Image: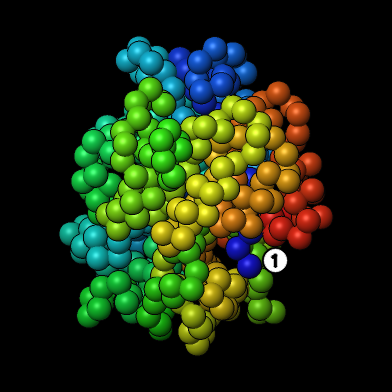
Amino acid sequence: MLTHRIIPCLDVNDGRVVKGINFSGLKDAGDPAELAESYQNQGADEIVLLDVSATPQGRSTQLDCVRRVRRRLAIPLTVGGGVRRVENAEALLEAGADKISVNTAAVEDPGLLQEMAARFGSQCTVLALDAARFPDRDGFEVVVLSGRKRTGMDALDWAEKATRLGSGEILLTSWDRDGTKAGYDIDLIRGVSERTSVPIIASGGAATPEHMQIAIQAGADAVLAASIFHYAESTVQQIKAALLHKGIEVRP
Amino acid sequence: MKTRDVWIVPTGTANTASVIAGIERIGLRARMIERPKEALSAGYLVLPGVGALAAAMQRLQRDDMVSVLQDRIRADLPTLAICLGLQLLCQGSEESPGLPALGVVDGVVIKYPSSVRVPQLGWNLVQPDSTCHMIQTGYAYFANSYRLTSAPGGWSAAYSDYAGKFVAALEKGRVLACQFHPELSGLWGQQLITRWLGDEAILGERTC
């Protein structure tokens, strides 16, 4: 039986792991390669590395960072942040990524997903979908540019379209919950799960194993978290032990 | 050719960086095949692959690799096929009807049904039958939309469950074909690669 993945996320700025609420007020949380290896040793099922560098100079360290992480990592590595073209994805794969996530560039040019899926396969083409509740009505809208821009585009429609174009996985982040420790947005997970047939990674708001259990029961295949791991509030082992106890299948 | 070299067949879009890193962590050297004859003389050969079967077959045909790979596997030379690599060994895939693959494994791969999320992405329990020598019970990382549902004659098999039982890996002599990614399957995967290499590769590395 396929187990549910526990995925630590490393937000990388200028080659250092950072954590902050909605990417403002960033705090240093360590070296990406060291942290990735330590999570692997704790039993992490995959690592997500998102480059949040705001400047081209910061981003130029991304390939080197991926190479350093890859050398130490014998588990899957998903990389995103700043991927605008197929060539960016190819360079990241050559540096050692196994999957590539795209966000803003796919919203601006959905054909990018199609091109990536044709070239590298759907299993390699991850849609990073950042969503927030509409301020004035039910439902969710897509947000881009690290939360700086609301698009007004329906998030569930976009999820369905992106998978039709070839996306083989959705990294689904609730922008309302990110950094709040209030738990994942369950309505968002349920909605996207019902509209698509690819695996979903829930992201944004996790603080406890209960949050993860609820997200998995709502339709998430995998759960992602950052700060609870970076600040050693929980280890991956502790989370997995708690989930196993609740009857959720995880890799021991 | 020194046994510490592990040669990799370029199939176009495979995540070769992960395969190379996995080989280097064991202490061996990974090299890319450039000429077909290298694939026949290589002490160890890895056939990796992700993405579409048709594109990978085109690449193998373009590089004159088809008959060399068929000969190598029939001669039972140490060969590791990974993910799409396993599917390339089969007769073909539902993904590309009518397109012959390498055909050294008697079977056709078919897509997972819509009752499960596709692709299968994640860690699944692998259970070998009693005739397997290399594969042991453990969790492996899968990233696949197609699979073999039954083991072909002449091969030992390990199985996992996703929409029913499917072939997680096949082995025969020195040939190992994994639907999962051993290079991404943590310590368990690394130990499997080490068993595939056998004692002489590790000993060779120590004395070189």
Q: Which amino acid does label 1 sit on?
A: Thr
Q: In this view, does A9 lie to the left or right of A94?
A: right
- The residue carrying pointer 1 sits among few (fewer than 14), some (14 to 19) or many (20 or more) residues within 10 Å by Cα, namely few
Q: Which residue lies furthest to the front in this view?
A: A136
Q: Can residue A129 be seen in this view?
A: no
Q: Mark 1 lies on which chain?
A: B
Relative to A227, is B143 above or below? Answer: below
Q: Front-most of B9 and B116?
A: B116
The image quarter in which residue B129 lies: bottom right
Q: Front-most of A151 and B206?
A: A151
| SS at circle 1 | loop
- Residue at position x 39%, y 77% in the image: B110
Relative to A72, is A190 above or below? Answer: below
Quarter holding the N terminus of chain A is: bottom right
Q: Which residue lies furthest to the left in this view?
A: B62
Q: In this view, does A74 lie to the left or right of A161?
A: right
- Residue at position x 64%, y 39% in the image: A183
Q: Is residue A52 visible?
A: yes
Relative to A152, is A29 above or below? Answer: above
Q: Front-most of B184 and B61?
A: B184
- Residue at position x 57%, y 48% in the image: A186
Question: Which residue in the structure is indicated by mark 1?
Answer: B137
- Residue at position x 79%, y 48% in the image: A242
Relative to A233, is A30 above or below? Answer: above
Please state the horizontal and vertical placement of residue B180, each as a whole percent of the image. 52, 61
Q: Is residue A208 left or right of residue B158?
A: right
Please state the horizontal and vertical placement of residue A215, each as a whole percent of the image. 62, 50
Q: Front-most of A19 and B108?
A: A19
